[in-house]
Amino acid sequence: ALGMPLNELEIAQVVDVTDRNSDGFIDVHEFIELCLGNDHRGRAPQHPLVQLEEDFVEFLSRGMAANLPLEQAFKYIDKNNDGKISWREFRSALVALGFDC
């Protein structure tokens, strides 16, 4: 498993801080910002959410190196194809990627 074990609250917090328009979901622009910006929004470097973001971004960077565009990664995570990632979809993606959730 990558990083530290995460609970549902921590996953919801990552979604919350990534959700710039406060609609409760991560849209494609917010997702790309998370992946490219790596903005920890003032959290301490040892904070578990920072580690999650770093591990997730590292995984996506490997995918991009294999020519996986971020928009395609977003569509993979957005299982119901509504153009938004819920915290449940985000958690499912983390589990599929090997995170301990």
Image (spheres, rainbow, N blue to C red):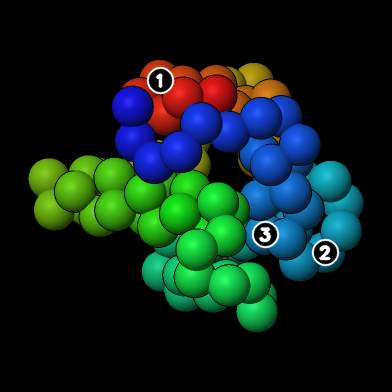
Which label number is shown at residue 31?
A: none
Mark 1 Cα within 10 Å, few/some/many (few <14, many 20+)?
Answer: few
Question: Which quadrant, please, contains the C terminus?
Answer: top right
Q: Reply above or below: 93 against 19.
A: above
Q: Nearer the viewer, mark 2 or mark 3?
A: 3
Q: Amino acid at mark 1?
A: Ala
Sequence-wise, the earlier of marks 3 and 1 is 3
Q: Give the residue at x 46% y 38%.
A: 4
Q: Amino acid at mark 2?
A: Asn
Task: Where is residue 60? Give x, y as percent.
Answer: 31, 48
The residue identified by callout 1 is 96
Mark 2 Cα within 10 Å, few/some/many (few <14, many 20+)?
Answer: few
Mark 3 Cα within 10 Å, few/some/many (few <14, many 20+)?
Answer: many
Q: Reply above or below: 78 against 64.
A: above
Q: Is residue 67 visible?
A: no
Question: Which quadrant, please, contains the N terminus?
Answer: top left
Task: Where is residue 53? Give x, y as percent.
Answer: 48, 55
In front of the other: 3 or 84: 3
